[in-house]
Each structure stands twice: as structure tokens, then as C-alpha cells.
Image (cartoon, rainbow, N blue to C red):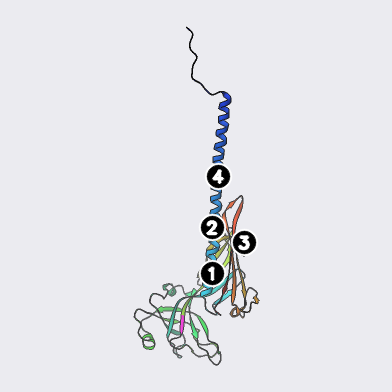
Amino acid sequence: MRRAPSSRGGFTLIELMVSIVISGIVCGAVFDLLLGQSRFGRYQGAREEVQQNARVALDVISAELRGAPAGALVSGGTDAIRLRVPRAWGAVCNAVEADTTRLWVRFAPGTFPPDFQYARRRWGVAVAQTASVAEPVARWSFVPTVGSTTTANPCDTRLGASPGAVEAVFTGAGFLDPASGVMTIPAGSQAFVYEEVGYDVRMAAGASTGAGMYWLRRVIGFEADGTPRWEAMAGPLPAADGLELRYSRADGTAIAAPVTAAELPQVARIALTVRTRSRTRTHGVPQLSEASTLVYLRN
């Protein structure tokens, strides 16, 4: 008896090869899609990194410049600046002409910075010298000094009781008005504790993280000999001009950097530009960003 033909079918070799090719194309397309999304994510992350670095650095420096009083600039270069920034405001309690090296100042509760008493080289007190015949314009006198809180002071007598206020006595040379040679700081005058801060751009060396790249640095203290200690604040930067500072007078005329000591009081405006780059690269090229602002000083 003859066997009936089988009803089961199968793929021919050509059909199998076609299905393999189609599967490969689909898998390749999915892989390229995932790879593209990954590259786009890295690109976006790098872009966000450089934009945030530039904006944060610019905001920090410009905020301290805006808060600095007249005469607070210590030095100014094309890629470096140092200034004295107020950290706590108070009122002078007493200044005795016979005692020209000590000054008592009252501060509101919780405002006197505890770091002041041991970070001596980057701190000081500034007092408002009143106008005199020898120097008719009132100004700030910045006195690098040692300060400590005290309970034996004339604040309550001269300014009245103030529960919870902190009284500090400062010891230093410079409370005399250099123009008149006498103490011209009456009770009730404004005073503030200042911190000397600085920013510059340098290339990291040695085995440190980011070695061989430029970084924006900030002063965090001073050695015993007065040499500043720095730490990286933002970066990396594309080059040594990652921080650019341009100075001008109130009438708009430019002041060449580095600014001389005679021209520091004339600086009324500072144009800041911060340029940053990403650590990661897209197609071998790092992402770059630039942020700028113009700061008017309190002169």
C-alpha cells in the first residue's frame, strides 16, 4: 500500500538565509539606536557639566565682588584677583585715643565667624574712619588683626545693653588714621570682620587629579610666612585664559592689568569671563562653555 505524502513543511535554504539577514539588520538597527542614545546622553552630560561649572564659578566670584566695600581690592590681574570680603557687620563700642592698638566691636547674635580666631592671616577688621581735616573723605581702614570674643568691654556702657550680642576686641596696628595721626573712630561707627579671598588660574601638576589641565583656584588659607594656600574650585578650563578679568573706571576708561596700587581705588567696574571644558570628549572633542558678567563695585 502506498504511503501518503507528509503534510509537514519546512524552510528552504534560501528562506533561512533571508530570515538571518533580516534579523541581522534589525539587531544592527536596534544596537545603533541604543549606541546613539548612549552617545547623546554622554554629550548632554558633558554639556551640562561645563555650563554648570562656568555659571557657578562666575556667580561665586561676582557675588563676592558685589559685596565688597570700597577699597576692598588687594590686587587685580588678567587671570587673578584678591579682595577683602565682609563676613560679619558690627558697631564700634569704644576707641580710646591713648589705646591705639585695640578696638571693641559689637556683633549681632550668631554673626561673629568662629573661624576668625585661628585663621589669622586671611582675616582682619575694617572700620569706617571719619572724615578729618587732613583727609576730608571718609573711608574704610583694613587692619589685619587678631580678634577674640570678650566679656570685659565698654559696649553696654557706650551703646546700651543688647542681650545675646557678641562683643569682640581686636588687637592690631592700623587703627590710627594715617593722614591725621589720631584715632578717628567714634563709638557707633560701622565695622566688619573681613576675609581675604583670592582666585587665579593654574595648571595642576604632579600626581593630583586633573594634572596637566588648567583649574580655577581659590585661596583657602595662608602659611606661616604669608604664602597663600589654594584649592581647585572649578574646571578643567580650556587654557590659561579660563578666567579673564578686565578693569575700568567709572567713566568707562580701561585700566590695564596688573592694576597698580595707585589705580586700585579707581577700579569701578570689572568684566568677568569664565571658560570651562568637559573631561569627556564627543568624537574626540571636549565640550566648551563660556559665561560673562559685568560687576559694579561700591566705590
Indicate the position of residue 10 as horizontal and vertical percent values: 52, 22
Label 2 and label 1: CA atoms lie apart by 18 Å
Label drawn at residue 61: 1
Per the image, label 4 sits on a secondary structure element best described as helix
Residue, disc 2: 49
**Residue 101: percent from the left, percent from the top?**
46, 85
Disc 4 marks a residue whose amino acid type is: Leu
What kind of residue is marked 2? Glu
Whole-Å distance between the Cαs marked 3 and 2?
17 Å
Q: Nearer the viewer, mark 3 or mark 2?
A: 2
Q: What's the amino acid at mark 1?
A: Ile
Mark 4 to mark 1 CA distance (whole Å): 39 Å
Whichever of callouts 3 and 2 sits on the residue coming sooner in the sequence is 2
Q: x, y percentage for residue 163?
A: 34, 80
Predominant SS along the magenta part? loop
Type of residue at label 3?
A: Ala
Which mark is first along the chain, 1 or 2? 2
Pointer 4 or 2: first along the chain: 4
> How many other residues sit within 10 Å of disc 2, few (<14), some (14-19) or many (≥20)?
many
Q: Name the residue under label 3.
A: 239
How crowded is the residue under tag 3: few (<14 C-alpha within 10 Å), some, or many (20+)? Answer: some
Q: Name the residue under label 4.
A: 35
Between 11 and 82, the one lying in front of the other is 11
